[in-house]
Amino acid sequence: MNNVKKKVYRNTPAFTMMAWGSFIFFVGLILIGLYTLKEPLMVKGYYLMGCVGLISSSFTVSKVVRDNQEDEDNYNRIFAQQDIEE
């Protein structure tokens, strides 16, 4: 018997590629917009810091929401098993 389990991903490769593609596309648009902006370097730096902060915090928020949901599911599964055993 072969007990090796196949690794299963939640998202299809096409959806993953679309997500990363759109991310790279919009980061590119932000950089082009900052490059062509007719403002001093200080203003461009302020906008760039805001964009980088927004991007990094959106990754963090999505990870926290996902982790909290997984923890809630695991918590419910543990107590559901305990109810079955009693």
Image (cartoon, helix red, strand yellow):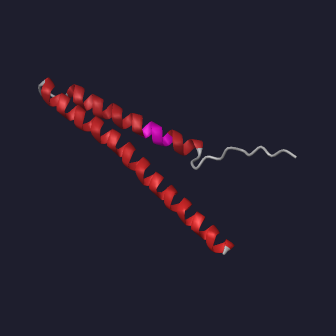
Q: Farthest residue in the right direction?
A: 1
Query: Quick one: 78 or 67, which is closer to the camera?
Result: 78
The picture quadrant where one finds residue 86 is bottom right
Q: Which residues are magenta?
A: 18-22
Magenta span: chief secondary structure: helix
| Percent x, y of residue 17 | 52, 39
| Percent x, y of residue 30 | 29, 34
Above-or-below relation of 34 to 73: above
| Percent x, y of residue 60 | 38, 44
| Left or right of 73 in this view: 23 | left
How many labels, in total? 0
Residue 32 forms part of the magenta stretch: no
Query: Quick one: 40 or 9, which is closer to the camera?
Result: 9
The picture quadrant where one finds residue 81 is bottom right
Query: Quick one: 79 or 57, which is closer to the camera?
Result: 79
Q: Farthest residue in the front direction?
A: 86
Residue in the picture at 47% in, 42% down? 19
| Left or right of 41 in this view: 85 | right
Residue in the picture at 45% in, 37% down? 21
The picture quadrant where one finds residue 4 is top right
| Percent x, y of residue 58 | 35, 45
Above-or-below relation of 50 to 32: below
Residue in the picture at 58% in, 50% down? 10
Q: Farthest residue in the left direction?
A: 40
Above-or-below relation of 15 to 27: below
